[in-house]
Image (cartoon, coloured by chain):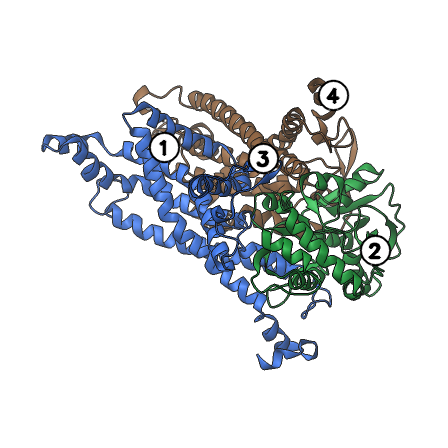
Chain colours: A green, B blue, C brown
Amino acid sequence: MKKLIIAAALVAMTTSATAQTIRMGTEGAYPPYNFINDDGEVDGLERELGDVLCEIAGLDCVWVTNDWDSIIPNLVSGNYDTIIAGMSITDERDEVIDFTQEYVPADPSAYMALAGGDVDVDTGVIAAQTSTIQASYIASSGATVVEFASPDETVAAVRSGEVDAVLADRAFLADIVAESNGELVFIGEVNIGGGVGIGVRESDAELKAALNAAIEVVKADGRLNEMVKRWLDIDANY
Amino acid sequence: MEMCADPSTLDGINWWTCYLTTGKHQAFYASFGTVLLLLAITAPVVMVLGFGGAMARKSKILPLRWFGLAYTNIVRGVPDIIFFLFVPIAMDQGIEYLRHQIKCPDVLEPIRQGNDFVVCSIAKMPLSSSPQWIHEVYGFSLASIAFALVFGAFAANTLYGAMNAVPRAQLETAEAFGMSERQVFWRVQVKQMWLYALPGLSNLWMILIKATPLLFLLGVEDIVYWARELGGSKTSKFTYPHPDWRLYYFAFLMVFYLLMTWASEKVFNRITKRLSHGQATVGAGS
Amino acid sequence: MSCYDTLIDYGLRSIGIGARLLPKTDITLCDQFVLIGSGMIWNVYFAVFAMTLGFGIATLVAVGKASENPWASVPAKAFIFVFRGSPLFIQFFLAYELFVLIPKVGIDINLGFATITAETRWLTKAWLGAVIVLFLNTSAYSGEIFYGALRAIPKGDIEAADAFGMSGFRKFRRIIWPAMLRLAWPSYTNEAIFMFHATTLVFFSGFPAWRQSGDALYYASYFADKTFNPFVSYPIIGIYFVSFTLIIITLFGWANKRLNRHIAPEQKIKFRFKPQFIR
């Protein structure tokens, strides 16, 4: 762990040759943040960013995927060392794990519905993925929440008319709306959750410091803004 | 392949050829091997555990009998999904805890730091510097053990029943020949029980096959994982965009399982015929 | 909040009665026990309805498979093969996809005293759709069990019935059916247990949970997610299932005694919980 502190200190100047292996945990099912591409490799904003951060911090990184449901228990029990999976920084999560500074600003969640419908997002039937911040938001609003196991199913439910609308991260829905030939539209936005950060174990202070320093670098040289714009179409302005 | 370099220009048969041979699809095809490998590894372990469990229940030592009874009844009383949801992570932590005690006894920091489970880095299983394939093999082994633990309990019950189903007269005859208790057990009871165990064991095998879609719960990238991954709708961020095709992928899995069942039924019918040979039961001689 | 208040708020939460929101922070052991217990209502509901409905069809399927008429035996065999040969997990998925495709219409059903409108969109809800899948599944498994039992009925029983001049449905109702049940009962008990365990798959794959009302596993994974700790909620649901399994064994044991009450002691079928059929 000593090595890490040095790496953090020298972060702007050098890439350490004797790298430590860090296992990067992601979900692999949340484009464009992270997904498995057609070659079977982890791809997306977080893959690109993660590799850059590892290079800056002089870490040797390997990518592993884990189901969203158990992604935090598997981090704290040490199966991998970071969660870099589009995870919003929330108070509940922060009690159990630590987050680096955010690398994607708080992106509003968006409601998506069939075009031409008249949906009231405060009283209607709204789909969300099980145990996401969107699901608990809908549950505490006046609407009826319907929880599906995967993001794909939530979109399918809107298409089939099972539900009136779906609430999810805007960046996730953007491509789907754009490529639906006008079948699907955004009907509203809501701000829930904070920015997206990398999750690390609370006992891993050095790793957190190293990653924070590396994020600082990509924020300063504008690389992060460019990546976020390209992948998510969000103006980050870091 | 050469022509697959720019998929957006492809159409018809060429598109399909390229689509069905992507790296991701190859992983999908390979995962069928993973499932078969799991079955091949688990089945013998299940038999060993089952035999051990059955022996424990027949044991003359009371605590061992209790243990056998508790193992078979508790495991069978809980749905297998629930077992799979926390047994691998518990086993993983158990193994690392033991390794920590042995390998770095002088580390005084507690293993449980708040929510974190922290062992010294040389006690990690596998080491975090190990290549990815070792991690996958390890995860796969944990999954196999979880499967074997669950199905071992069922096998124990079947084998226990089968041992008791061997006709008394056969055992008494063996005793009359002057065999010791041990010899009677190993040479007669264990040899003869298979016929009685076969219907139960063949069912167990069918059950085992049909439990494999739960493998993805254990963190193994199995056929269900890839079917979901490939079938889900793909936007133009992907090389091969397509709408939601999960239905077709799952229908394909359904065919795979039906074929497995069909083939297994054939094999078991053969074994039954073989075992019934020379036995004084209704099934014999036909 | 005392545990009694929790019971009032969440005891029937799974069927939509009580507090609207689930506990989010400061989750106590009591919260977990009560909510997961509340979820068991769904597991019991699924198992009871599927088993009750499936019982009759299973008899038909068994008789069909045993029939010499190919118009009866071939469909029965195919039905059993498909539902026993594929994982329930995949059956749920395919059934849900199929139900979604059905056009959403209402069908008026006249019950004499009132007219209700049966809507096809109910099929995509767990309370109907999942029951149908479980019902078909258990019919196939029980059908195979009953078929095995039919073939094991002693010839003497049937000859005796013939000698009494019984025939057709009467012979079936009075002789064959009771004998079949008696022989099939131990295996049928296992089927009941496995069906009960299989109900945990409903919300886990296929059917969505409405208004955060789900079964025991839904709440167990909710807590595992909220507390980030799988070592509390999963053992709790395990305790529930072991207890309910014991209840099933007791109930079916009583029924077994009744079925065997006229049989000479040494011929009685020993009641053993052995693994015969599962999915």
Amino acid bearing label 4: Met
Whether labels 1 and 4 belong to a single chain: the reply is: yes
Q: Examine the image and state in which quarter residue C65 appears.
A: top left
Label of residue C158 in the image: 1
Amino acid bearing label 3: Leu
Whether labels 4 and 3 belong to a single chain: the reply is: yes
Q: Position of residue C126 (x, y in %)?
A: 67, 40
Depth check, mark 2 against mark 4: the one in front is 4
Q: State whether residue C156 appears in this view.
A: no
Report which residue position mark 2 lands on: A114
Whether labels 3 and 2 belong to a single chain: the reply is: no
Amino acid bearing label 1: Ile
Instruction: Name the residue located 58 percent from the left edge and 70 percent from the top edge.
Output: B20
**Of marks 1 and 4, which one's residue comes earlier in the chain?**
4
Along the line of sight, the residue nearer the viewer: C30 or C10: C30
**Of marks 4 and 3, which one's residue comes earlier in the chain?**
4
Give the letter of the chain under mark 1.
Answer: C
Tag 4–tag 3 contact (CB < 8 Å): no
User: 10 Å neighbourhood of mark 3: few (<14), some, or many (≥20)?
Assistant: some
